[in-house]
Amino acid sequence: MDWTAFRLSVELGLWTLALLLPVSIWLGRVLAFRRFPGRGFLEAAVALPLVLPPTVLGFYLLSAFGAGAPLGAAWQALFGQGLAFSFSGLLLASVIANLPFAVQPIRNGFAAIPPPVREAAAVSGLPPWRVFARIELPLAWPGIATAAVLTFAHTLGEFGVVLMVGGAIPGETQTVAIAIYDRVQAFDDRSAAIMSAVLLGVSVVALGLANTLSRRVGRQRRDG
């Protein structure tokens, strides 16, 4: 078992959650409650990483992170290091690749809140931020928890985007999914099998939790 690669994967998953969840809560709430021009285009952009092959997404991200691209050049000027083949670039790529896994469950969680509940909170005189903090967030928590579980599990198992953007630098960008690939290439089937079993276990637990939480969202919609 490559514990360094596993630790890096867990660290990447936690940082991805820390950066992505606040953005996804805001975006999911907007998509659940508001109607505005371009809403369909925004929903399509959020879902795009689901339908793009990971290598295609990774190629475009790698191109954007390169020193010759505006984003890569600006990052280099600000922080003195490039985005490509670094943990920072890997983290940014992970946030983008996981966007639909976070936004869609959160959107469903907010959409499941019965309209009369929000209307009653609004007419009671509560300011919008209190309605959000005391009414909407607690009711949408199954969707938020589902997003967190799916995002973390997907980050641990992501291969194509990670390989394209981060490469396989041990201790810096070599996640457990890349380590499994390297072990197979080296004919170290035992190590590959152990790491694969760990990821399989994490995936089964994550899917079980996600299904349980999704059923709660469905019950909220029926009760509403």
Image (cartoon, rainbow, N blue to C red):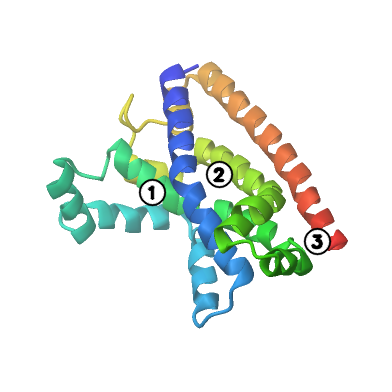
Residue ID at (46%, 52%): 97
Q: Which residue is mark 3?
A: 221
Q: Quadrant of residue 183?
A: top left
SS of the residue under disc 3: helix
Say which residue appears at 33% left-offset and 25% top-offset.
170
- Identify which residue, 37 or 80, lies in the foreground: 37
Q: Which residue is mark 1?
A: 93
Q: Measured from the top left, where is residue 49 in percent x and y? A: 49, 58
How far apart marks 2 and 1 lie (CA) works out to 13 Å
Q: Please state the total of marks drawn on the protein image.
A: 3
Dot in front, 2 or 3:
3
Q: Secondary structure at mark 2?
A: helix
Choose top left, top right, bottom left or bottom right for residue 146: top right
Q: Is residue 220 visible?
A: yes
Label located before the other in sequence (2 or 3): 2
Check if mark 2's residue and mark 1's residue have beta carbons within 8 Å.
no
- Mark 2 crowdedness (10 Å alpha carbons): few <14, some 14-19, many ≥20: many
| 22 up-or-down from 185: above or below | below
The circle drawn on residue 151 is 2
Mark 2 or mark 1, which has the lower sequence index? 1
State the separation of the CA atoms marked 2 and 3: 23 Å
Q: Nearer the viewer, residue 212 or 85?
A: 212
Residue type marked 3: Arg
Do callouts 2 and 3 mark residues in contact (Cβ within 8 Å)? no
Which quarter of the figure is the C terminus placed in?
bottom right
Q: Position of residue 27 (x, y in %)?
A: 52, 61
Looking at numbered disc 2 in the image, what kind of residue is underneath it?
Thr
Q: Is residue 57 above or below residue 2?
A: below
Does residue 111 appear left or right of residue 189 in this picture? right
Could you classify mark 1 by the number of other residues whose Cα lies within 10 Å: few (under 14), some (14-19), or many (20 or more)?
many
* Image location of residue 222, percent across then percent down: 86, 61
Q: Position of residue 204 (x, y in %)?
A: 70, 34
